[in-house]
Image: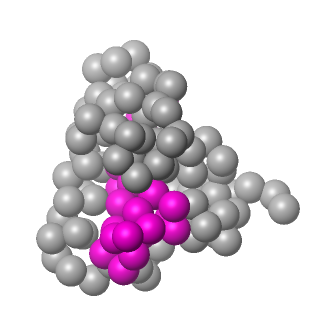
Amino acid sequence: MEEKTIDRERAYALLCRYNKEEFHLKHAKILEGVMRYFAQTEGYAEEADFWAVAGLLHDLDFEQWPQEHCIKEQELMRQEQLPQRLIRACASHGFGICIDIQPEHQMEKILSRH
Protein backbone atom coordinates (compact mmCIF):
# COMPACT_ATOMS: atom_id res chain seq x y z
CA MET A 1 0.00 0.00 0.00
CA GLU A 2 1.47 3.34 -1.05
CA GLU A 3 1.64 6.12 1.53
CA LYS A 4 -0.07 9.37 0.70
CA THR A 5 1.03 12.82 1.68
CA ILE A 6 -1.48 14.90 3.54
CA ASP A 7 -2.07 18.62 3.30
CA ARG A 8 -3.76 20.80 5.89
CA GLU A 9 -7.18 20.69 4.21
CA ARG A 10 -7.27 16.89 4.08
CA ALA A 11 -5.87 16.63 7.62
CA TYR A 12 -8.55 18.94 8.99
CA ALA A 13 -11.29 17.01 7.19
CA LEU A 14 -9.95 13.79 8.73
CA LEU A 15 -9.86 15.40 12.16
CA CYS A 16 -13.47 16.56 11.77
CA ARG A 17 -14.57 13.07 10.75
CA TYR A 18 -13.72 11.77 14.23
CA ASN A 19 -14.02 14.93 16.34
CA LYS A 20 -17.11 17.10 16.75
CA GLU A 21 -16.62 18.82 20.11
CA GLU A 22 -15.37 22.39 19.85
CA PHE A 23 -12.82 21.80 22.61
CA HIS A 24 -11.06 19.03 20.69
CA LEU A 25 -11.08 20.96 17.42
CA LYS A 26 -9.72 24.07 19.11
CA HIS A 27 -7.03 22.06 20.90
CA ALA A 28 -5.96 20.52 17.59
CA LYS A 29 -5.73 23.93 15.91
CA ILE A 30 -3.70 25.32 18.81
CA LEU A 31 -1.23 22.43 18.57
CA GLU A 32 -1.07 22.91 14.81
CA GLY A 33 0.16 26.47 15.39
CA VAL A 34 2.48 25.48 18.23
CA MET A 35 4.14 22.81 16.11
CA ARG A 36 4.52 25.16 13.14
CA TYR A 37 6.18 27.70 15.45
CA PHE A 38 8.61 25.13 16.85
CA ALA A 39 9.47 23.80 13.40
CA GLN A 40 10.55 27.30 12.43
CA THR A 41 12.42 28.08 15.64
CA GLU A 42 14.14 24.68 15.91
CA GLY A 43 15.64 24.79 12.42
CA TYR A 44 13.05 22.70 10.57
CA ALA A 45 11.25 25.49 8.68
CA GLU A 46 11.14 23.40 5.50
CA GLU A 47 9.09 20.81 7.42
CA ALA A 48 6.75 23.30 9.11
CA ASP A 49 3.69 22.04 7.22
CA PHE A 50 4.42 18.45 8.27
CA TRP A 51 4.97 19.45 11.90
CA ALA A 52 1.72 21.45 11.83
CA VAL A 53 -0.25 18.48 10.48
CA ALA A 54 1.19 16.30 13.26
CA GLY A 55 -0.04 18.85 15.78
CA LEU A 56 -3.45 18.93 14.15
CA LEU A 57 -3.87 15.14 14.14
CA HIS A 58 -2.09 14.13 17.35
CA ASP A 59 -5.37 13.49 19.23
CA LEU A 60 -7.31 12.15 16.25
CA ASP A 61 -8.77 9.26 18.25
CA PHE A 62 -9.20 10.84 21.67
CA GLU A 63 -12.78 12.08 21.45
CA GLN A 64 -14.29 8.77 20.33
CA TRP A 65 -11.80 6.27 21.76
CA PRO A 66 -10.15 7.76 24.87
CA GLN A 67 -9.35 4.29 26.23
CA GLU A 68 -7.50 3.46 22.99
CA HIS A 69 -5.76 6.82 22.65
CA CYS A 70 -2.61 6.72 20.50
CA ILE A 71 -3.52 3.16 19.48
CA LYS A 72 -6.74 3.66 17.52
CA GLU A 73 -5.31 6.70 15.73
CA GLN A 74 -2.59 4.53 14.23
CA GLU A 75 -5.26 2.27 12.73
CA LEU A 76 -7.25 5.24 11.41
CA MET A 77 -4.16 6.81 9.89
CA ARG A 78 -3.07 3.56 8.26
CA GLN A 79 -6.54 3.23 6.71
CA GLU A 80 -5.91 6.66 5.18
CA GLN A 81 -2.48 5.47 3.99
CA LEU A 82 -0.75 8.31 5.80
CA PRO A 83 3.04 8.37 6.08
CA GLN A 84 4.45 6.08 8.76
CA ARG A 85 6.54 8.99 10.00
CA LEU A 86 3.34 10.93 10.77
CA ILE A 87 1.67 7.93 12.40
CA ARG A 88 4.69 7.34 14.63
CA ALA A 89 4.97 11.01 15.60
CA CYS A 90 1.32 11.27 16.60
CA ALA A 91 1.39 8.00 18.53
CA SER A 92 4.64 8.81 20.33
CA HIS A 93 3.12 11.81 22.09
CA GLY A 94 1.47 9.32 24.46
CA PHE A 95 4.74 7.64 25.45
CA GLY A 96 4.75 6.46 29.02
CA ILE A 97 1.03 7.13 29.41
CA CYS A 98 -0.76 4.91 26.92
CA ILE A 99 1.86 3.68 24.44
CA ASP A 100 5.45 2.45 24.37
CA ILE A 101 6.59 4.33 21.24
CA GLN A 102 9.33 6.60 22.55
CA PRO A 103 9.73 10.03 20.94
CA GLU A 104 13.06 10.16 19.08
CA HIS A 105 12.97 12.96 16.48
CA GLN A 106 12.98 16.55 17.77
CA MET A 107 9.43 17.00 16.43
CA GLU A 108 8.21 13.96 18.38
CA LYS A 109 9.86 15.22 21.56
CA ILE A 110 8.21 18.62 21.23
CA LEU A 111 4.82 17.11 20.42
CA SER A 112 5.02 14.82 23.44
CA ARG A 113 5.42 17.82 25.75
CA HIS A 114 2.24 19.56 24.55
Q: Residue at x 20, y 59 (%)?
A: 27
**Residue 48 falls inside the magenta stretch:** yes
Q: Position of residue 114 (x, y in %)?
A: 24, 41
**Residue 93 vertical placement versus 47 (above, below):** below
Total marks in image = 0
Q: Is residue 43 left or right of residue 41?
A: right
**Residue 51 vertical placement versus 6 (above, below):** above
**Residue 95 falls inside the magenta stretch:** no
Q: Residue at x 64, y 58 (%)?
A: 82
The image's colouring method is one colour
Q: Identify which residue, 95 or 89, lies in the foreground.
A: 95
Q: Identify which residue, 18 or 63, lies in the foreground.
A: 63
Q: Is residue 14 visible?
A: yes
Q: Is residue 2 left or right of residue 15?
A: right
**Majority secondary structure of magenta residues:** helix
Q: Position of residue 80 (x, y in %)?
A: 64, 69
Q: Residue at x 57, y 51 (%)?
A: 87
Residue 2 occupies which quadrant of the picture? bottom right
Q: Residue furthest top?
A: 43
**Residues in magenta, as a range:** 46-73
Residue 20 occupies which quadrant of the picture? bottom left
